[in-house]
Amino acid sequence: MAGALLALCALLLPLLPAAPSRADTPLDLDAGGRITDTVGALGQRRAQVITAIERLRTTQRVQLYVTYVRDFSGRSGRAWADATADRNGLGERDVLLAVATHGRQYAVSADKLSGFRADQLKAVATTAIAPAVAQHDWAGAAIGAADGYGAVLRGEPVRPPAISPGNPDPGGEGLVPGHRRVWAPVAMGGGLCVLGLYLCARRASRRRRAAQ
C-alpha cells in the first residue's frame, strides 16, 4: 500500500503548480517571436497581435516587441522597459511595449534615433495604448500601439482601439490561465497522497508498538 502511494506521489508532485514568481528584471524576450507573454494575457487573440506587428514591420520598417508580465518587480515601467530593451539588444528601429497586467501599467522603450518624436510616442500612448490597458484589453493595447505607430509615421491621426476587455488579472493566481480543470485534480491527488502516507505511517507505528 505504502509503495503504491509513494509511486503515485512521485508522478503527481512534479505536476503541482509552483508559487507565482516575480518578473525578471530585465526580461529575456522570447527568441521565437516578437511577443513574450509570461502570464497568458493574449489567449486566442495572439494571432491578431502578430498580424498588427507584422503590418507595422512591412509598411514602416519598424519592429514592435510586446511583453506581458505580472509586474515590473518594483521598478518604474520605463526603467524596466529600457533595461529589457538594452538586455536584448534592441536597435534604432525597434520599439518595446511592456505591459504589467496586475497593476494595469505599461511603458514604451524607443531609441532616441528611432525616428519617432516625443509627441508622437505620447499620442500613441495616450490614445491607443492607455485606454486598452485601463480596461484590461491586453491584445488591444498591442494592436493599438502597432496601428498608432504606423499612423503617426504616415502623418495621420492616432485612432483609439475598439475595446474588447480580457481577463482582468491573467496569471494572478500563479497558474497557467484556463487550466483550472487540470490543476484542481492534480492538487487534490497530491493532498490524497499526503493523507495516505500519514495514515500508513500511523498504522506502521501502531504495529511496532503492538509487537513490543
Image (tube, grey):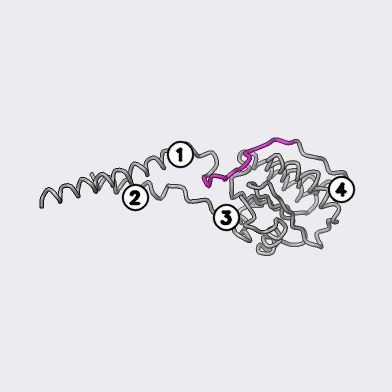
- Find residue 22 and name its label: 3
In the rendering, at what x and y percent does residue 111 appear? 78, 61
Residue type (three-letter) at the residue carrying disc 1? Val
Q: Is residue 176 left or right of residue 60?
A: left
Residue placed under numbered mark 2 in the picture: 10
Label 1 vs label 4: CA separation? 48 Å
Q: Which mark is residue 154?
A: 4
Q: Earlier in the sequence, mark 1 or mark 4?
A: 4
Q: Which of disc 2 and disc 1 is earlier in sequence? A: 2
Q: Secondary structure at mark 3?
A: loop
Disc 2 to disc 4, C-alpha distance: 59 Å
CB of mark 3 within 8 Å of CB of mark 2?
no
**Around disc 4, counting alpha carbons within 10 Å, would you say few (fewer than 14), some (14 to 19), or many (20 or more)?**
few
Residues under numbered marks 2 and 4 in contact, where contact means CB atoms less than 8 Å apart: no
Q: Using the image as rendered, state which of residue 158 and residue 81 is in the foreground.
A: 81
Of the numbered discs 1 and 3, the one sitting upstream in the chain is 3
Q: Identify the disc placed on residue 182.
A: 1
The kind of residue on which mark 4 rests is Arg
Q: Main secondary structure of the magenta part?
A: loop
First in residue order: circle 3 vs circle 2? 2
